Image: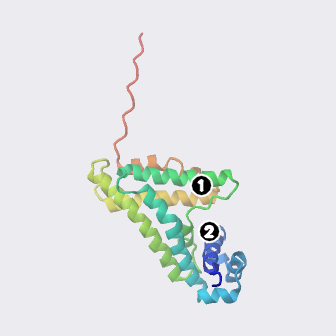
Amino acid sequence: MGRVSDARQRLLEATNELTWKLGYNAVTVDAICEKADVRKGSFYHYFESKPALAKAALEAQWESYSRPLLEASFAADIPPLERLKRYMETMYKNQKEKKQRGERVLGCPIFSVAMSGEGVEAEVVEAAQRALKRKLRYFQTAIQDANDAGLIKVDDTEAATQAVYSLFEGAWARARIQNSPEPLAGLYEQALRLLGAAEQESPPKKSRVA
């Protein structure tokens, strides 16, 4: 039996890497094939077009990277605010390590596709937005659980979720623009303020003897 080709997987990985670094509009089928070391004829054996490949690559990114990270941080047995803290601090740590290795800070690859602007096919934008909505649901569940437990005080958990998520994605965008992980630092504390979380009491100060 002949060896099973991994050309499809290489195409998916090359697409995600090039799109993440260069932007969707700047990446061509030829560049993807060259990066993946796959002939163009083989490309069309697996995918009918660049948008078809992009949608498959976004789904592969979700399944192989985004979802496992989210599920590890947002597990139901973890206290709700701790879920947010774990995820935000993990993102900061990961990007800080990339910077220390001399790599660029590129933010969320799915968000990058969704924000690529004019020239991106509607079906690709919709695929990116679906993935981002999946991520949003993890935030929403944690915030709803925190509100139910009396850990935060919000009247509208959906609006609160949108505010926290916008804070998070805005920090991702700034991290990419600045090529620095620092916009991701302290996000959890900022989220707590948005959510009206009760601040932890600081230890009482010792009175000075006159």
Residue at horizontal 50%, vertical 64%?
66
Residue at horizontal 55%, vertical 52%?
92
Q: Earlier in the sequence, mark 2 or mark 1?
A: 2
Residue identifier under label 2: 20
Q: Which mark is residue 95?
A: 1
Amino acid carrying mark 2 in the image: Trp
Residue 92 lies left or right of residue 44; in this view the side is left
Q: Residues within 10 Å of mark 2 (few under 14, many from 20)?
A: some
Q: Secondary structure at mark 1?
A: helix
Q: Secondary structure at mark 2?
A: helix
Q: Is residue 115 above or below residue 4?
A: above
Residue at horizontal 44%, vertical 65%?
135
Q: Is residue 2 above or below residue 185?
A: below
Image quadrant occupied by the C terminus: top left
Query: Which quarter of the figure has residue 40?
Result: bottom right
Q: Position of residue 154 (x, y in %)?
A: 30, 53
Image quadrant occupied by the N terminus: bottom right
Residue 50 lies left or right of residue 137; in this view the side is right
Q: Position of residue 190 (x, y in %)?
A: 45, 48
Indicate how the structure is coloured in the image.
Answer: rainbow
Residue at horizontal 34%, vertical 60%?
141
Residue, far front: 1
Amino acid carrying mark 1 in the image: Gln
Residue, far top: 210
Q: Position of residue 60 (x, y in %)?
A: 53, 73
Q: Residues within 10 Å of mark 1 (few under 14, many from 20)?
A: many
Q: Is residue 195 above or below residue 19?
A: above
Q: Position of residue 149 (x, y in %)?
A: 27, 50
Query: Which quarter of the figure has residue 121?
Result: bottom right
Q: CA distance from mark 2 to mark 1?
A: 14 Å
